[in-house]
Amino acid sequence: MDGEETRSEKPRRDVPRRDRRGLALVMAGASGVGKGTIREEAVPRMGDVAFSVSATTRPRRPGETDGLQYRFLSEAAFRETIAAGGFLEWAEYVGDLYGTPRAPVDAALAAGRDVLLEIDLAGARQVAAALPEAVLVFVAPPSLAELERRLRGRGTDDAAKIAKRLARAREEIRATGEFDYVIVNDRLDDAVEDFLAIVRAERLRASRLTEADVAAFLREGDA
Ligand code: 5GP
């Protein structure tokens, strides 16, 4: 059965871990599809979660602050970080470079904190290879026509850049089968609820139990 095959690709552990590792949550999907908005609505309702601030060489947009939405780097600084192995993943996207700084993600996961990464398809594939337990969520637009309308409405890109982003979106949408979950961002509230439901279920996986959890379940009364 297909479902069985997919499931057996996920690493399984039958023995509880000594320490809890954080969950790596990857949200991918075309630029303009609303990943950032879903994240802004969902994060305050997710409890403790670290957001991975990506580095990029693309120019800052009005309203963006260095270190908040992105670390804005020169191409030279970005390439130095690649050479030093400082990125968990990186990719070129429509003429600019984007990457996930490795150290904050490693530190959060090791401390048992969940981490949310908002990246493109190429990046999601690299994270899946580096962290097989990562949960990959794809955010799809209701249609390419609707995505185009949103990209134009955002007014941050010229026509040529929008055409490139749409071409890239078409490629990404064809790869939805590589993901664990797909959310359609039609109504924002529904998309946020869907994302929160995924996070909640993933946090409840038996494979995330620690030895201490199991010991607590086994505790019996003194009598
Ligand atoms: P934007 O320029 O619209 O902020 O982002 C363009 C695309 O780059 C989006 O699909 C966004 O998710 C992706 N992106 C943002 N940060 C990263 C990153 O660290 N790594 C990768 N691979 N893609 C990223």
Image: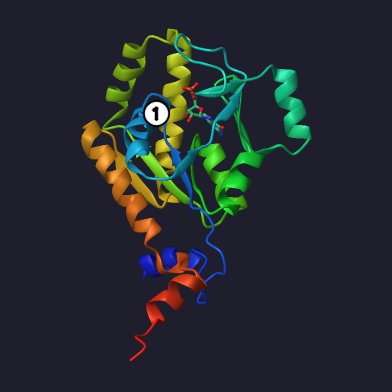
Q: Is any atom of residue 186 visible in this view? A: no
On screen, 122 above or below 113? above
Instruction: Say which quarter of the image contains residue 139.
Output: top left
User: Where is residue 81, by image quadrant?
Assistant: top right
Q: Residue at x 48, y 15 (%)?
A: 64
Mark 1, ligand 1, within 8 Å: the answer is yes
Q: Could you tell me residue 96's position as x and y percent?
A: 60, 20
User: Relative to residue 50, is residue 74 drawn left or right?
Assistant: right
Taking the image as shown, residue 207 lies to the left or right of residue 3, namely right
- Most foreground residue, 199 or 120: 199
Image position of 216 with respect to 95: above or below: below
Point out the residue furthest to the front here.
223
The N terminus lies in which quarter of the figure?
bottom left
| Residue at the bottom extreme, as displayed | 223
Q: Is residue 138 left or right of residue 61?
A: left
Look at 44% across and 7% down and name the residue there: 158
Q: Position of residue 202 (x, y in %)?
A: 39, 57
**For mark 1, what is the residue?**
36
Q: Residue at (40%, 82%) from the top-left corner? A: 218
Rendered location of residue 24, percent (x, y): 50, 49
In this image, 171 relative to 204: left or right? right
Residue type pointed to by label 1: Gly
Q: Residue at x 50, y 64 (%)?
A: 9
Q: Is residue 6 above or below residue 124?
A: below
Colour basis: rainbow
Q: Quadrant of the C terminus?
A: bottom left
> How many numbered tags mark residues here?
1
Viewer can see residue 179: yes
Question: Circle 1 — which element?
Answer: helix
Mark 1 is surrounded, within 10 Å at the Cα level, by few (under 14), some (14 to 19) or many (20 or more) other residues, namely some
